[in-house]
Image (spheres, rainbow, N blue to C red):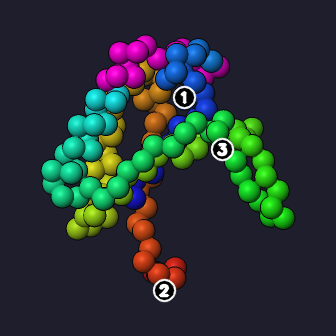
Amino acid sequence: MILHYASQADYDAMAGKENAAGPAWKPEEVAAMGEFMGRWTGELVESGEFVDAAGLAAPVHTRRVGAGNVVTDGPYAETAEVLVGYTIVDVASFDRATEIAAKLDDTPAPEHVRSRAYVDVRPLMSGLEELNA
């Protein structure tokens, strides 16, 4: 699974709102990012490695349910970056998944965003016996 991260400020900037994290994205920058992600996903579909993907709504729309069923609405001040989406791939190796994720470094975005962008690559477990693996 390739886990994509950003912050509420990034969502705001993509929506055209300047904030402390940087200037608002231009509409053509958002469009270029969307087009790139569409091509990236399309390549995975064509290769037969694509399983599933989804983007998540902005952190402001989050609701956390904690111990004792305490419900807190987001975003959370202690959380700078949050999961914003995922892509599941079915590949021959962890190295191949990493190779696919590395292509995201070419995602068009303003430089101040690109310089701090990252994704995580994590294998999915099929059972609890894999906890010790």
Q: CA distance from mark 1 to mark 2?
A: 38 Å
Q: Secondary structure at mark 1?
A: helix
The answer to which of 122 and 74 lies nearer the viewer is 74
In reply to whether residue 31 is colored magenta, the answer given is yes
In the image, the segment drawn in magenta is: 20-32
The answer to which of 54 and 105 lies nearer the viewer is 54
Please tell me which of labels 3 and 1 falls first in the chain.
1
Residue at point 80%, 61% (across, down): 69
Q: Is residue 27 left or right of residue 9?
A: left
Disc 2 marks which residue?
Answer: 129
Disc 1 marks which residue?
Answer: 10
Q: Where is residue 64 drawn, in percent x and y?
A: 71, 52
| Three-letter amino acid code of the residue under disc 3 | Thr
Please tell me which of labels 1 and 2 falls first in the chain.
1
In reply to whether residue 14 is colored magenta, the answer given is no
| Three-letter amino acid code of the residue under disc 2 | Glu
Q: Where is residue 99 drawn, in percent x and y?
A: 27, 52
Please tell me which of labels 2 and 3 falls first in the chain.
3
Residue at point 35%, 15% (across, down): 28
Q: Is residue 63 left or right of residue 114?
A: right
For label 2, the crowd category at 10 Å Cα-Cα, with few meaning under 14, some 14 to 19 and many 20 or more, is few
Disc 3 marks which residue?
Answer: 62
Q: Is residue 121 visible?
A: yes
As drawn, which residue projects farthest toward the bottom?
Answer: 129
